[in-house]
Image (spheres, rainbow, N blue to C red):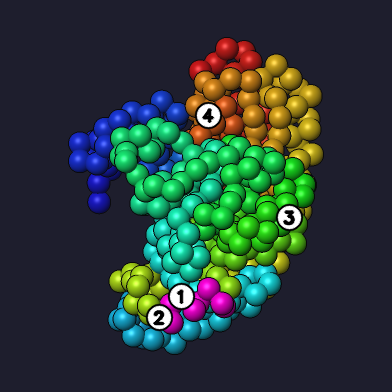
Amino acid sequence: MSTKAEALRDFAEYVNPMKVRTLRHAGLDIIEGRREGARIWDLDGREYIDCITSAGSFNVGRRNPVIIEALKEALDELDQGVFLICSRAKAELARRLAEITPGDLKMTMFGVSGGEVVDFAIKLARGYTMRPGIVSAERCYHGHTGFALSAIGREVYRAPFEPLMPGFSRVPFGDAEALEGAVGPDTAAVILEPVQGEGGIRIPPRGYLQRVREICGRHGALLILDEIQTGFGRTGKMFACEHEGVVPDIMTVGKSLGGSVYPITATIFRGELGDFLIANPFIHLSTFGGSDLGCVVGLRVIDYILEHDLPARASRMGERFARGFETLLERYPDILVEVRQLGLMMGLLFSEDSLGPRMSYQLAQNGVMAIFSGNEPSVMRLMPPLTITEEEVDLVLEALDKSMQAIVKGGN
Ligand SMILES: Cc1ncc(COP(=O)(O)O)c(C=O)c1O
């Protein structure tokens, strides 16, 4: 295998030179070697606490031995399976997802990526309602595939590919009045993240999701909640919509369902929407979606999260972070403006955009891998595994303190 320098050189030459340059600038030109729990080791031996976690993909920790064991056992018997025919693992995971998701969410369509299951959610909404309109939120992020990209709240991602799908509109996130004005008889669905991740860890005002639910119901529009980042315990509940007791018509999940080892995503929807599939059982297909190996991993991930009550752990560790953030707010009032946090979905708003990349750089020097928000660079995102220990929380807080101190003193 190549050395770190060779890997970076080949990546620049054969994958994307600008990515390497940008990451180097942010101190993140790391090549992941060993990975374990909340930690990773660069090929040059340096150790980091992972607060990026592919935006909340590693809730059960990196290479969790219990999940690895389940995958190894599955490999003794299974492979990906034939996607066209029924499978025991698929059926079991679909039943389990129906059990753990709120309300009457019941049926599942599996996928491989988040964008893919968002696309299916939108297809299902249009196909079921026979309406064209999709309302999403400014700064939202739902992936880079066709329908998801058409919904996405950042011009720079969309512009080169115009014209995208017609029928999409966006409203400010958290503003129920604006949504009321945008939803009408042509609206198939409203799609939202319960907490915006890429948008800068934006937590909507209390009661917002309930208002959205009510507005959708009144207009016969479906509510799609994208829990790809917020799901599986990240915010202190199994799913973030549970903070407000809101049940969507369609929910998308992904990232952490794959336990850091096998990609698997899902669109989960109310039973009656399944009527659309009775007439069209093969209208949406995915060769690798819901592969047998991925389903075995997903089942073990769900059990692990429940057995270890990771949502409660996210709240507890989140409180420990919150106490540290209060001290940092007092200590660095000139640069640290606001803390945005729900469980272990955490964002620190700094006074200007350039401080995001500078904080990434400083944190990397202090042993923490963290990245600013794509859609709001002044916000540093911190999304460690939910298995993070108290000692590791304190190390991250210490690194934040040292990094802000360095910035205040005029460091990079
Ligand atoms: C809320 C949300 N939806 C969708 C996606 C897209 O997922 P994927 O990158 O697996 O396509 C992401 C990825 O970060 C996300 O955070």
- Mark 3 or mark 4, whichever is nearer to me: 3
Q: Earlier in the sequence, mark 3 or mark 1?
A: 3
> CA gap, disc 3 to disc 2?
32 Å
Q: Which residue is mark 2?
A: 279
Q: Position of residue 114 (x, y in %)?
A: 44, 57
Q: Which residue is mark 3?
A: 210
> CA gap, disc 1 to disc 4?
41 Å
Magenta span contains residue 273: yes
Number of residues whose C-alpha sits closer than 10 Å to that of mark 2, classed few (under 14), some (14–19) or many (20 or more): few
- Mark 3 or mark 1, whichever is nearer to me: 1
Q: Position of residue 116 (x, y in %)?
A: 40, 59
> CA gap, disc 4 to disc 2?
46 Å
Q: Position of residue 177 (x, y in %)?
A: 69, 41
> CA gap, disc 3 to disc 1?
26 Å
Number of residues whose C-alpha sits closer than 10 Å to that of mark 1, classed few (under 14), some (14–19) or many (20 or more): some
Q: Earlier in the sequence, mark 4 or mark 2?
A: 2
Task: Classify 95 as above or below 371.
Answer: below
Q: Label 2 near label 4: C-beta < 8 Å?
A: no
Secondary structure at badge 1 equals: helix
Can you see residue 143? no
Q: Which residue is mark 1?
A: 276
**Which region is colored magenta?**
271-278
Kindly identify the amino acid type of the residue bearing the numbered disc 2: Ala
Q: Label 4 near label 3: C-beta < 8 Å?
A: no
Q: Label 2 near label 1: C-beta < 8 Å?
A: yes
* Magenta span dominant secondary structure: helix
Secondary structure at badge 3 equals: helix
Residue 377 image label: 4
Q: Position of residue 7 (x, y in %)?
A: 27, 42
- Mark 3 or mark 2, whichever is nearer to me: 2
Task: Classify 126 as above or below 32.
Answer: below
Q: Earlier in the sequence, mark 3 or mark 4?
A: 3
